[in-house]
Amino acid sequence: EVLLPVDVFCGRQMPDNQLETQLCAAYSIPDGGASLDCGPDSIEKFLPKIFGAKVVFWTGAPGKSEIEELSKGTKMLMDAVATLHERGGYTLVHGDDLAAAAAKWGMAERVSFISGGGEACLEYVEGKNLP
């Protein structure tokens, strides 16, 4: 099952270099804006699915983990994935941003496997032949 966010914190850089953020429906991000973290409805949707899974393949960070205020949702999801691993589930975290977030929050050892960025992992999952 592929899970996608239903709401996100979105934002845009203002002329004074301040970041203006707001909660948006996932597919209604204003022009010039970007998704910065998953919202509370997305978290509510994702957590029971994570805890009910045997395997989680997570690719792509939903938040900006390098910015504390914009990483709360991502951190909650990472903690849930780590808890699933500790309960015997298999958890694969894919992507440079997620790998950096796991390391930053001391969770790199609390997941089954971390794959750095690159298309090879995704192509492998798709069943493509790799060199």
Image: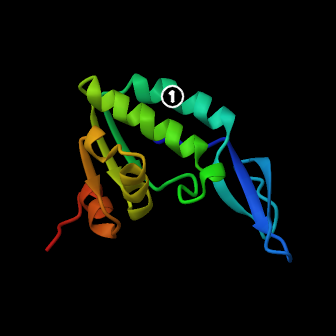
Q: Quadrant of residue 13?
A: bottom right
Q: How is the image coloured?
A: rainbow
Left or right? Give the position of 109 relative to 53.
left
Eyeballing the image, is 94 above or below 111? below
Is any atom of residue 1 visible in this view?
no
Q: Quadrant of residue 40?
A: top right
Q: Nearer the viewer, residue 49 or 83?
A: 83
Q: Quadrant of residue 5?
A: top right
Is any atom of residue 46 visible in this view?
yes
SS for dot 1: helix
Residue at 28%, 52% (x, y): give it.
114
Q: Residue furthest right?
A: 15
Eyeballing the image, is 37 above or below 49? below
Q: Where is residue 44? Give x, y as percent.
A: 61, 28
Q: Nearer the viewer, residue 103 or 91?
A: 103
Left or right? Give the position of 47 relative to 17.
left
Q: Where is residue 63? Give x, y as percent.
A: 58, 53
Left or right? Give the position of 108 relative to 72.
left
Residue type highlighted by circle 1? Leu
Q: Where is residue 51? Give x, y as percent.
A: 41, 24
User: How many other residues sit within 10 Å of disc 1, few (<14), some (14-19) or many (≥20)?
Assistant: some
Residue at 49%, 38% (x, y): give it.
77
Q: Dot 1 corresponds to which residue?
A: 47
Eyeballing the image, is 36 above or below 39? below
Q: Where is residue 52? Give x, y as percent.
A: 40, 22
Q: Quadrant of the C terminus?
A: bottom left
Residue at 52%, 36% (x, y): give it.
76
Q: Residue furthest left?
A: 131
Q: Quadrant of the N terminus?
A: top left
Q: What number of labels is visible?
A: 1
